[in-house]
Image (cartoon, helix red, strand yellow):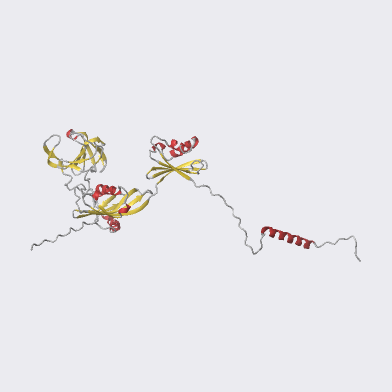
Amino acid sequence: MRQHGKKRYAPVGKVLAAVIGVLGIFWLAASNPTSASDPPAVKRVVVPAPPPPVSVYDTLESGETLAELLADHGFDGPAIHQVTQVVRDVKNPRTLRPGVVARFTGPASSNPESVLLLVSADSLLELVLRDTSWSASVRTVPVTIDTLRLAGLIDSSLWFATLSGEVDKLGDGEFQEYVYDMADNVFGWKVDFTRDIRRGDAFRVAIERERRPDGSVRVHRFIAIELANRGRRYQAIPFTRPGGHREYFDGEGSALRGTFLRYPVDFRVTSSFSRRRYHPILKVRRPHLGTDYGAPRGTPVKATAAGTVTRAGTWGGYGRMVEIRHARGITTRYAHLSRIGVRQGAFVEQGDLIGRVGSTGLSTSAHLHYEFLVNGAQRNPATIDLPSAPALEAEFTQEFVGVRDQALAQLDMVALPVLPAEPRVAAVVAD
């Protein structure tokens, strides 16, 4: 018999299970509309890249200030004030000279966000905008270090030698700098490069260089040099004593440096030491007990050795003249100067600037008259045996030998050139 008025309900657990199952099916369908065998779809979103920064170059003109240069490139008054203030923390803006190259970098449609100033060949001033503030810093131009090996065969002078070795690495005018350094600072006490160089002389040299990004040389240091001059061989090995200065020694450890420079200016001899020379003004023959160096007016004159200035003023036919007293009874004089750069009683070191070439006194043109006196008597500085500096101390010998051997190994990578043998002409025998 059926019962009326009473509903029957499914168990609660079964109902919940059914509902969850249906919802699960819809969720799977929504999250994975394709079939299980299809690979998942990848949605690609293209985000446009910002335009690259733009760099503009400019040069500080004569009479132009940093503030004016900044204004030309979109900087307003407050920004210019802030930039010049931070620059003063690292460098005085007024010391920026005409010709300074500036690089302005920033978005194409906005003001620069960084400025780079090439203050000198070795110094960069960098300005950077971070948020709303500018900062300034000075950094050194980066350099690369390399080794250059050259050899030269001399025809008329060292300056016009025929070069071999790594010649392709040389920049314009670079070799001439090395020649002056070799002549003045390395072999200047042993060889008179204006008189002693002969055809067939030769040299080879290894040089360490610091090169800037533009290829120019910031600093050079000789590793080793060998010079063949009139049948003699000279070697130069740089060595620095602990706490001392860099000096040059030969292969045995003897100093190349003399206590006197051979010449006080880097120019040619125009009149040598003579006991009987015709004087162009007095029109008579009389002793010329010194050496004249032809040089342009204003050329720097160097003290040939350390000593005390005993005269600094005008003295008869010498015109403006400086006299220096040295050790061992030696005195040197520098005459016809246009300007004097020292005072009587001052002590000067070898190579110090003491005056400039002129034509004062009995002189017909700009030149330096140089005298070398021993115990009050003039002597010829070109022929006198000038004293050398002390040899290397025994305590440094072992260290020097190691430096020397490594340096000479660099020279072995380039051959010392020699003149080709003259062709022999067979004798003609008459019938």
Q: In this picture, is 275 found above or below 42?
A: above
View extreme (bottom): residue: 1
Q: In this picture, is 328 found above or below 208?
A: above
Which residue is at the front of the view, 15 or 100? 100
Residue 319 x %, y %:
20, 34
Q: Is residue 114 left or right of residue 414?
A: right
Name the quadrant containing residue 115.
Answer: top left
Say which residue appears at 67% left-offset and 58% top-offset.
31
View extreme (front): residue: 431
Say which residue appears at 15% left-offset and 36% top-offset.
280
Is the C terminus in the top left, top right, bottom left or bottom right quadrant?
A: bottom left
Q: Is residue 30 left or right of residue 131?
A: right
View extreme (right): residue: 1
Residue 106 x %, y %:
49, 44
Which residue is at the front of the view, 281 or 208? 281
Q: Is there any visible trace of residue 227 in the rendered image?
A: no
Residue 348 x %, y %:
26, 40
